[in-house]
Image (tube, grey):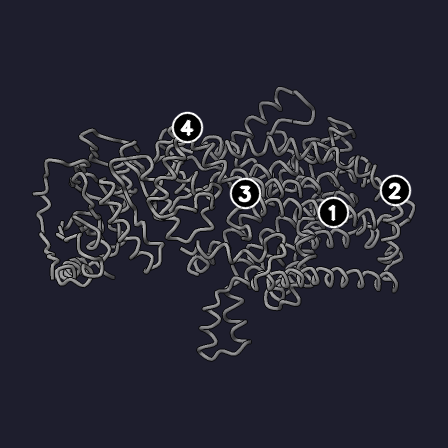
Amino acid sequence: MHMAATPQKVGATGGATDGSSTLADMIADFATRRKSLWVLVSLATLFTAWEIAGRVPISFAFPTFLETVSALLEMAFDGTLLPAYAITFQPLVIGVAVSAVLGIGLGIVMGLSDKAEWLLAPVFIVLQAAPMAALVPLVTFIYGIGLVAKTLAVIMLALPVIVLNSYKAVRHVNPSLVDMCRSFQGSRLQQIFKIIIPDATPVLFAGLRLGIAAGFIGVMLAELLITPTGIGDLITYHRSIANYAHMYAAVASIIAVSTLTLAGLQYVEVRFLRPEKRRK
Amino acid sequence: MKLFGIKIPMMTALLVWALVWEIVGRMDVIFLVPPMSAIISAGFDLVATNSWQSATLVTLRSFLTGMAMAIGIGVPLGIAMGRFKIVDNIFGLWVNMFVSAPLSALVPVLMILFGLGETTVVVTVFLFAVWIIVLDARAGVMQVPTSLIEMGRSYGASRLTIFTKIILFSALPEILAGIRIGLIRGVKGVVIGQILVSIIGYGELFELYSRSFDMERFWALTILLFAAAMLLSAAVEHFEKRIEYYAGAR
Amino acid sequence: MATSISARVANPAATTTSDAIVEVRDIGKRYGDIEALRGINLEFERGKLTTLLGPSGCGKTTLLKIIAGLVPATSGDIRVNGKVVTGPGPERAFVFQDFALMPWATVLRNVAFGLELKGIGLAERNRTARHYIAEVGLSGFEEKYPHELSGGMRQRVGIARAFAVNADVLLLDEPFSAVDEQNRRKFQEDLLMLVEKERKTFLFVTHSIEEAVYVSDRIVLLSPRPGRVSQIIEPSIDRSAAPDVIRRDKGYLDVVEEIWQGLRQYAE
C-alpha cells in the first residue's frame, strides 16, 4: 500500500544530478553538493586527527598523514604500486569469478529445490558464520604457496557469502509474481527465467558485492599468511625495514581500492538494477 | 525437506556430511582428511589438555574485551549518528567504508602499534565488530516511527523521556541484530588476529598443529571453533526472537 | 426518478442456471488445523459480474485462488465450461491485489506478458497489448515502468494484461484495495464500461459493501470461520443511469444497508 511513496522516499540516495532547472531539482542539487561538502569535512577531520597523532607522536611506528601520502605518491610513481596491484588482483579476480559462477549457480539451485536446500544450506550457513581464516594454512599443504593457494583462500571466504545471498534472493522472490506467471500458464522454465531470476537479480548482485568484499579480506589474508606477494609483500617488506610511512600507505591504498570498488558496484546496482529506486 | 511425509530438520544434513567425511577419511585418500571419528576422539583429548584450556582462556578474554569495547562504543556512536545529523555526516563515510573494508590488511599495522600480544587481538576483534554495530544502531534509531515520538510529545514527555522510553526501546531489535552480526564478525576477528600474530591462543595452537601435521587436532580445534561460533549466533538469535514480537507490531 | 433498483434475495440452493460458465462443487479447504472453506457450492453465469463479499478471514480470496487454480482445494472440484480444472487455464485470467507487475519491465511488456508466455510473436503481442492499454486509458504510458505510475494506473496495467489473453473469465482479487478512494470510484465506473464492452464473466472479490453493490449483478456473501455461503443477493441496478444517480438512489442504499445488517454480526 505504501508502494507509491517509495520512489520519492529513496530518491535522495540516488545517483547523479543533471542540470535541470526546476526548483525541486535545484534543491536536490544543493543537497547533493552539501553531501559532497560533508564528505570533504569528514575526510578532513580524520586526516587532521591522523596528522596530529603522527606529530605528537603517539607511537614511534605512527607516521603522519602527510608522510604517508608522500610515501604513497612515491610508490605510485616509482613503479612499485601498480605491479603489486596486478599481482594482488590475480587471485582476487579469479577467485571472485569462480565464486560468482559457482555461488550464484548453487544458490539458485538451493533456492529452487527443497532437497538441495536441505543438503547444502546448513553447510554454507556454517561456513559463512565460522572463522574460515583458520583453514587458510591448510590450503598451503596441498597447493603450496602459489596462485592456486591464494585463489582458494579467496574462494573460501567469498563463496559462502555469495551462495547464501543467492539462495535468499531466490527464496524471497515476490510470490505474487510467481502466482501471476502460473495464472498465465507459464511453464516452470518460464517461471525461473522470466520471473524468478530477473526478480532476484538485484539481490544476486548485492550478494556478489558482499562476496567481493569477503574476497578482498581473503586475498589480504592469503598475502599476509601464505607468502608475501603484491600489496601483502609491500606491507610486510616495509614493516620489516621499519619504513612505516610506506607500510601505512600500502594498507590505506588497499582499503581505499576495495572501498571504491564496492562503492562503484553499489552505484551500478542502484543505477541499473533497481528501476524502482532510480531517481526520476 | 520432507521424506516419506516426515519433516526432516535442516541441520541434520550436517550428519550426512559428517558420514561422508568419515568414509573419505577411512579411504585414506589424503592425509588432510582423517576420519571424523578420529577427529572427535582427538577433540575429547584436546579439551583435556592444559594448552587448549589456557589458549581458550586467552581467546575468550581477548574476544570478550574486544566485544565489550565494540558494543560500548558502537551502540552509543550509532545512536548519536541516528539522532544528530552532524555526527552522522562526519562519521557516516568512515563507518560505511570500514564495515566492508579488508580489515585483515590492517592487522600488520596493529601488530607494530600494539605489539605481538593480546592487545592487537583485542583491537582486531573491536575493529571487526564495531562498524556493523554502529550501522545497525543508527538504522534502529532512524526508523523509530515519527508517530511514536509525536505521541510522546503530545502527552508532554520531555526530550530525555522520549529518548529513554521511546527511542531506545524502539531501536532495540536493530541494535541486537547489529550485536549478533558483530559477534560473528568478532569471532572471525579473534581468529584472524591470533593467526596473524600466531604466538597466542588458538593462533599458536593452529600454527603448532599444522606445522607438526597433526591433522586430527587441527580439525578438532576447527570444529570446536566453528561450533562455538554457531552456538553463539544461535543464542543471540534466540534472544532476538524473544523481543521480536514488538518489532513485528511496529 | 428513472432508476429502479430492487434487490432479489435468492436462496443459495435455487441458483442453478442453464448457462453457468464456472461451477464450484462442494469446495472445502483446510490449512493444517484451520478450516478456511466448507461446502461451497456456487455457479457463475456467463457474462455476469459476481462479487464475493465478506469480512476478512472468510476465505473469499482463497476461494477465488482455488477457482483460478493457484491454490489446490482440499475437497470438491471446480468446473469451467463443464470441464473439471485443477490448475490455471487459458479461459481464466487473474488480476492481483498487489498488481503483480514486473518492476523490470515496461507497461507494454507487462501487458503483453501473458501472450509472451504463450509464445506469441513480438509484433502481434505488442499490437494486442497496445489495444488494451488504450482500452484501460493508459495510452502514452507504454514505455513507462511500473514505479513511475500511481497505484490506480498500475492496476489498470494489471487489468489490461488480463484482458490481453482473451480469457472468458476474469478473476479480480480486491483489485482496488490499494487505490485511493477518489480513484477507486472512477475505476469502478470505468470497470462497468469495460464489462459492458468486453462481455466477459467477472468474479470480483472485495470487502467494500458499496463497491460490491455498485458494480455487481450478483453478490455472494460469505461468513467466516469456516468460510461458507451465507446469502446471495441480486441488486437489479439500471446500469444506464448516471453513476451519481445510482449512488444516491434509495434502492441502492437499501441494498447496502441490508448487506451491512447481514454482516454486522461478524464485525469485531
Q: Position of A143 compared to C188: left or right?
A: right
Q: Which amino acid, mark 2?
A: Tyr
- State the CA–CA distance, disc 3 to disc 4: 31 Å
Chain under disc 3: A
Q: Which amino acid, mark 3?
A: Val
Residue holding disc 3: A203
- Residues at discs 4 and 2 in contact (Cβ within 8 Å): no
Residue at screen point 45% across, 47% down: C146
Label number found at residue A237: 2
Q: Position of A206 compared to A258: left or right?
A: left
Quadrant of the snapshot with the C terminus of chain C:
bottom left
Quadrant of the snapshot with the N terminus of chain C:
bottom left
Instruction: Tell me where residue C23 appears, x and y as whole percent.
Output: 17, 36
Q: What element does badge 4 sit on?
A: loop
Chain under disc 4: C
Residue holding disc 1: B193
Q: Which amino acid, mark 4?
A: Gly
Q: Are marks 1 and 2 on the same chain?
A: no
Which is more toward the observer, C249 or B109?
C249
Q: Position of B242 compared to B113: left or right?
A: left
Q: Which quadrant of the view contains residue B79?
A: bottom right
Residue at screen point 36% across, 44% down: C134
- State the CA–CA distance, disc 4 to disc 1: 60 Å
Q: Which quadrant of the view contains residue A136?
A: top right
Note whether residue B215 is visible.
Answer: yes
Q: Are marks 3 and 1 on the same chain?
A: no
